[in-house]
Image (cartoon, rainbow, N blue to C red):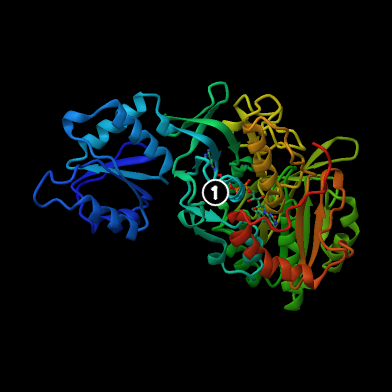
Amino acid sequence: MNDVQKLSDAISATGNLKPADMAVLAGMGFRGAINNRPDGEAADQPSNAELAQAARDAGLEYRFIPVSSSNLTEAAAATFAQAMTDLPGPVIAFCRSGARSTKLWTMASAMGAKSATYDVVVIGGGASGCAVVSSLHSRRPGLSVAIVEPSETHYYQPGWTMVGGGIFRQSETHRPMKQVIPASATWIASQVTGLDPDANQVTLADGSRLGYRMLVVACGLRTKWEGIEGLEETLGRNGVTSNYRFDLAPYTWELVKGLRSGKALFTQPPMPIKCAGAPQKAMYLSCDHWQRQGVLSNISVEFNTAAPALFGVADFVPPLMAYVNRYNAGLHVTSTLKAVDGPARIATFEIKGADGTIRTEQKSFDMLHVVPPQVPPDFVAQSKLADGSGWLEVSHSTLRHPRFANVFSLGDVCSAPNAKTAAAVRKQAPIVADNLLATLDGKPMPGFYDGYGACPLTVERGKVILAEFGYGGKLLPTFPIDPKKARRLAWFLKASVMPGIYWNLMLRGREWLTACSKQAA
Ligand code: FAD
């Protein structure tokens, strides 16, 4: 096969393809193909029909736009541009040498680049990006949607707590991105580096721009590991770990299994963070293991949180506190981890007193589970779309931007003050889909978000306190039972049901358990 020349993240060109090459191209990640070579140019040339069949067999969507070198017209370029819009990406265009395909692409781009403008551009192919695209296409299949997502891997982050607790295998918490991104959308495997809402465009890492009619910002948040001095150098070594990184969650379990005595510190940074319960979940599952092994009494356990209380919703504090006491763990509030010296096994905390004074304390450790500070991505914080704290500003009830009516956001990056969880995304995605389509049609927005989020607190192996709540800490239990009680049923949901809901329902636009309490928007 001839060399494949990348023209942009969305399209590459090549020449002289044989039917067998189609499977190779599919293996390289291509999902659409454009044949620009008229039949019968050369005696040994495969026909369009043979190539089309081979492309279909390999799972590629295929278009035939034949042009000769002397017939590179504007009309052909416009047809090419339309095919670029319609086909799933990335696309391979081909002729005898690749030159005609490249020329057509250049002409299409210069003509106003229909190929680079979509009805909807979604930034991020994580939990919220995939869910919202599926919800949009389940309502309006014809919509042209591009997802910009640089990662080859999609992560099920709620599973990392379970990996750190020795319950899930690491392999259960990730899948190749190409299997997860909805096939109905064009995947642009790049990173957004800038937002230009006045021009309805985003800038990609290679400097090219992508136009949109509607924008959905769903790029999550940034874990700021460098915010704790000395942490990055020692993560994964010297007893320092974090369930907030895919590669480190197995190390948490290794450390837990290996610790028979000594001191274990668990930390929580200032809010907001994703899954505010995850820092303490790591502690409970570790303590449960040590208790079962009969070594808990030899281990001094501490939970150091920057927050003034164990949990942000007061109703859940007493039952959680009962577990802190059961495990004989020390609770240290307004205590923020600032620095780690891994080789010396010393953690430095800043502790705020009731009178506002701040003192520094150094604590030794044998195991340290760290949750890093969490911030909006830089390109969001530096844009016109950010609120005063750098999060993507939205109306809390409609999830639409207050000044740019064609911009929506959901998931961890948006400014709504809900618990940043995949459970929140499950509710937000259909609301954004409804409200975005209504905006596109010039109609009132029907969707109203009540701030629902959920935090399954794994207080022991086999039992979970399922904290479900909305704005202002209002309890929003799915089931009509006391949500403050640790239950086996909730563990079953967390360990056995939720992963399936995530992969098979939420990411695919099957909107199970998504209704929000109704109120006028
Ligand atoms: P993400 O899923 O993080 O996806 C963001 C995507 O955007 C990524 O794929 C990223 O590559 C992409 N991206 C980033 N920057 C750019 C850019 N510049 N251009 C284009 N793309 C970009 N939730 C629960 O509901 N229950 C739980 O029990 C739970 N436990 C958790 C435990 C842990 C340890 C962690 C870390 C999280 C947990 N969560 C839990 C939270 C949940 O995983 C997140 O809230 C959810 O993944 C948010 O979805 P998102 O799409 O906003 O962000």
Viewer-proximal residue, 272 or 421? 421
Q: Residue at x 74, y 62 (%)?
A: 283
Q: Is residue 461 above or below residue 512?
A: below
Q: In the rendered image, which residue does mark 1 sit on?
A: 233
Q: Residue at x 72, y 50 (%)?
A: 427
Q: Residue at x 23, y 59 (%)?
A: 20
Q: Quadrant of residue 500?
A: bottom right
Residue 472 located left or right of residue 390: right
**Image x and y of residue 337, in percent:** 71, 46
Q: Quadrant of residue 207?
A: top left
**Image x and y of residue 80, in percent:** 33, 35
Q: Secondary structure at mark 1?
A: helix
Q: Which residue type does callout 1 highlight?
A: Glu
Viewer-proximal residue, 153 or 122? 122
Image quarter where the C terminus lies is top right
Viewer-proximal residue, 274 or 395? 395
